[in-house]
Image (cartoon, helix red, strand yellow):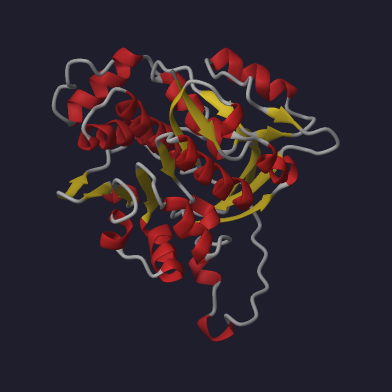
Amino acid sequence: MSIVITGSIAYDYLMHFPGKFTEHFLPEHMSRVSLSFLVDTMDKRRGGCAPNIAYSLALLGERPRLMATAGQDFGEYRQWLEAAGVDTSLVKVVDGKFTASFFCSTDQESNQIASFYTGAMANAAELSFRTVSDCRLTIISPNDPTAMTQYAEECRVLQLPFIWDPGQQCARMTGEELAGGLAGAALVICNDYEFELIRQKTGLDEASVLEQAGALVITRGENGCTIVERSGRTDVPAVPPTHIIDPTGVGDAFRAGFMKGMSQNAPYVVCARLGSVAATYALEHLGGQSHAYTWAEFRQRYEAHFDPLLTGVS
């Protein structure tokens, strides 16, 4: 039985702006914005939500299956993922298109402004869970919106436990699409800003989400996360980084840690703690796939901040 990861595959172009974006936004001129930020560095990295999640899950001892679409330039990326322990057999390469691209500028306060080129991601709806065998858990992370709603419906019909993770697509998707995706989810996960978008677009507050999904996790950056269940709320702190390099992919690493716990039937509080440790490793490196650790190193860092790991979580 396998963990299947859906979402975007992309190349990340990561840039750094040596200032504060907020100092250049003029409130009296917000109806007409024309800004250009001169960046001092740029790095091209392998990225995309799905490979980022899958990469950290592989570090944690799983062999996740990546289900997504990529372009004709995916060859070297596939080799990298396979070498890292990710099963790419479910990836469809779309001839005549390039892999999606993420262009992100980060300022000195870790604020980000980004653009995303769809590329081969637009073909994601050509894939289907009806052709996937032995799936025990999946995550529907940011991807082509049509594909995301299709996957959620397929998971409900096929009775596959799934995590609804609309992420950056909260800005693109309609309230109907967002509400349709979370219905029947084992877990809904988003950051605090994304949850506010979901609330505004769907009219669903925390209690209303729990009427349709098993649980809700809201991440809050350096303030950790909140697990909302029918039985109550639990706050889990973030793990302090030794240094901060780049926030890109931190949320994806958190999801990987959380899914590691879910795959071993750990309580959600333990899942969130695993996610917090995984997220901090990513924060200390550039991009979503530059960090590395052994399970022994990961466990030691976990237990330095939280209680000893439960027997059976390995």
Q: Is residue 80 left or right of residue 289?
A: right
Name the image quarter holding residue 96: top right
Q: Position of residue 108 (x, y in %)?
A: 47, 53
Q: How many marks?
A: 0
In the figure, is residue 184 to the left or right of 106? left
Extreme-right residue of the structure: 96
Asked if one can make out residue 221 in the rendered structure from this viewpoint, the answer is: yes
Quadrant location of the C terminus in the rendered image: top left
**Which residue is depicted at the point 36% across and 58% down?**
192
Rendered view: 39 above or below 278:
below
Q: Position of residue 311 (x, y in %)?
A: 17, 16
Residue at left 51%, top 81%? 27
- Seen from the viewer's position, the closer of residues 174 and 259 is 174
In this orientation, which residue lies closer to the viewer: 258 or 178? 178
User: Is the N terminus in the top left, top right, bottom left or bottom right quadrant?
Assistant: top left
Residue 204, above or below 109: below
Q: Residue 150, position in %: x, y?
A: 58, 46
Measuring 43% from the left and 36% from the top, which residue is drawn there?
159
> Can residue 245 be seen here?
no
User: Percent from the top left, x then y, of residue 301?
Assistant: 26, 24
Q: Is residue 234 above or below residue 35?
A: above
Residue drawn 80% across the image and 30% down it? 72
> In this view of the protein, which residue sits in the foreground, 141 or 55?
141
Relative vertical location of residue 198 with respect to residue 81 in this rendering, above or below: below
